Amino acid sequence: MALIRIDEVDVKGKKLLIRVDYNVPLQGGVITDDLRIRASLPTIEYALSQGCSLILCSHLGKAKGEPDPKFSLAPAAKRLSELLGREVKMAPDCLGEATKAMAAALTPGEILMLENLRFHPGETAGDTDFAKEVMSMAEVYVNDAFGTAHRPHASMVAFAKVAKKCCAGFLLMKEWKFLGEAVQSPTRPFVAVSGGAKVSSKLGVLNNLLSKVDAMVIGGAMANTFLAAQGYKVGKSLVEPDLYEAARGILKEAKERGVGFYLPVDCVISLDAGKPIAEMRPAGQVPFQAVPDDAVILDIGPVTAGLYALAIEPAKTVVWNGPMGAFENPAFAQGSFTVGHIVAGVRGLSIVGGGDTDVVVHQAGLADKMAFISTGGGASLEFLEGKELPAFAALKECQS
């Protein structure tokens, strides 16, 4: 069953509660990356064009069920106001009489931002009473927050259950289209590029994509586990010995399916094992068969980057999730940046799976060259695993 989009529902002149994802990075109360706010603009602008009054809600940070000023959504309301060129009112809370009075007083074209949903324990608990109280302020529920679509929280699931009418925003539908359709019916060759620290966090993705891709490219510390599982020494690098068997199983299945499986053939190492990543210094490049016992692998080497280019460049569909090394230290960011340029140069569909990969793409100045950058890290991972996300299931049930 397909989701119903906001432009397929009669919302003219109605009061909408839009669940956005404004979980943006803050530094000293200033937003350092407004991608998620800008990504919500098409839905908001469409609703305003229909003469709607808007109540926006989101979470920000890891608030623990009680008010915490450092996690206030006020900076997000201010940034949205600047982007729209109109006032965005800030509510004192996401429920309560004062907030309800502000919501009731909204006229067409006016926008109210509710305070952080996670200031109340009912949000993460998926509480129906909490959902009823928040939803009582609006006539239609619109979910446009893919970044939290994998969490069974009240604003993802319970809001849809108690709403009179519900629909998906344009961003949610865009994520559904790009991540869903690219994986289910990709234009081939289809290549998956997977990195990051741990195989455990990507095991479901690798297993699901193995039956769909033509080639799989592995980087980051997770590659260490695949190398070690085959008996190669990886020094003091991060590995997951309990997943050696799973890694060998993936390699075996890839071979049986005829899937090209690419692992690093050279590595950038450091001899500063035990130090924080930021303090580690590079100690040269070595072949993957010759990693010193006291070394830590922190990036793919230039020969590997060349090999990966041969695997990725012919692709018509590429899904990239996870950096190739410890990019947070500039000394070990080159592999991730190089792969970013390779993916950006693909003459086909290039999809970036959010999270750290999104950060790499922006640091490398490649955001405009990618076909699609997901706004969800964990959500995109679960989607690529083939799971039905709670938010999508709730919307389908509400719409049936």
Image: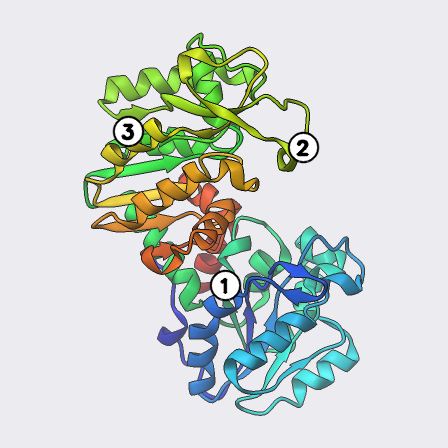
**111 above or below 173?**
below
Image check: 316 left or right of 394?
A: left
Query: Could you tell me how far apart the alpha carbons at marks 1 and 3 are, in whole angstroms?
Result: 32 Å
Which quadrant of the structure image shows residue 285? Answer: top left
Element class at badge 2:
loop
Q: What amino acid is at disc 1?
A: Leu
Q: Which residue is mark 2?
A: 276
* Quadrant the C terminus occupies: bottom left
Task: Assess disc 2: are there few (<14), some (14-19) or many (≥20) residues with their C-alpha within 10 Å of its C-alpha.
Answer: few
Q: Is residue 208 above or below residue 232?
A: below
Task: Give the label, 2 or 1, closer to the camera.
Answer: 2
Dot 1 or dot 3: first in sequence order is 1
Q: Position of residue 134 (x, y in %)?
A: 67, 70
Question: How far is disc 2 from disc 1 in space, using C-alphas?
Answer: 29 Å
Residue 136 placement, left or right of 245: right
Q: Which mark is residue 307?
A: 3
Residue 147, can we see it? yes
Return the x and y of residue 21 as percentages of the image width and height: 56, 62
Tag nearer the camera, 1 or 3: 3
Residue 168 at x, y = what percent?
A: 44, 66
As drawn, the label of residue 35 is 1
Residue type, numbered disc 3: Leu
Q: Is residue 241 left or right of residue 231?
A: right
Q: Judging from the image, what secondary structure is the residue with disc 3 in? A: helix
Badge 3 or badge 2: first in the primary sequence: 2
Please tell me how crowded label 3 is: few (under 14), some (14-19), or many (20+) other residues with Cα within 10 Å. some
Q: Residue at x 29, y 48 (%)?
A: 182
